[in-house]
Image (spheres, rainbow, N blue to C red):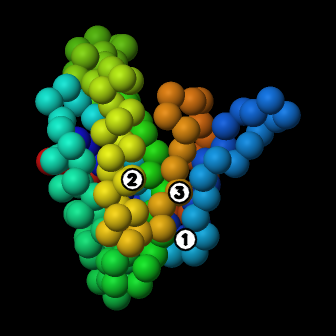
Amino acid sequence: MRAVVQRVDGASVVVEGENGPETVGEINGEGLCVLVGVTHDDTEEKAAQLARKLWSVRMLADEKSCSDIDAPLLVISQFTLYGDARKGRRPTWNAAAPGDVAEPLVDEVVARLRALGATVATGRFGAQMRVSLTNDGPFTVLIEN
């Protein structure tokens, strides 16, 4: 699994609904916005490891973690984290797991975070999403396991 983790001062995800734009996930104030990519050999154990890391990583102000101050997380699936643009002009997505593999593992990350006590908002898997955030720092870290 691969996650791009950004310290934010608020973030939201909007999708196009039947009646226009619809906010499906939002956090207010200090927290983390997490883009999660899944590859073919990822497992529930890797999802659990990622959740523990996200809950405890010290990226917030004064080297605090979400668990230290009960800061929320916005978790968004993003298969493009496994894009490969080394050759040619078009990225390939061969390393990204298909949706039927990736969706339950992203859901597992969210479930494990919530089991740890986290407040978690999410995007909508497979949807065209517009993500808005205020990057605080900026402070962005890549986590892989």
Q: Residue 35 vs residue 88: left or right?
A: right
Identity, as a three-letter code, of the amino acid under mark 1: Asp
The answer to whether the residues at label 2 and label 1 have Cβ atoms under 8 Å apart is no
Disc 1 to disc 3, how far (Cα)?
14 Å
Could you tell me residue 1's position as x and y percent?
Answer: 22, 41
Report the residue marked by disc 1. 9
Q: Earlier in the sequence, mark 2 or mark 3?
A: 2
Name which residue lies at 61% across and 58% down. 26
Q: Nearer the viewer, residue 77 or 4?
A: 77
Q: Please, which residue is most extreme toward the front here?
A: 115
Q: N-terminal of the two: label 2 or label 1? A: 1
Q: Position of residue 114 (x, y in %)?
A: 40, 63
Q: Secondary structure at mark 2?
A: helix
In x, y percent, where is residue 138?
A: 43, 66
Q: Amino acid at mark 2?
A: Val
59 shown above or below 32: below
Observer-side mark, 2 or 1, equals 2
Residue beneath the point at 45% across and 75% down: 71
Residue designated by label 3: 121
- One can see residue 4 in this view: no
Question: Residue 110 has which mark?
Answer: 2
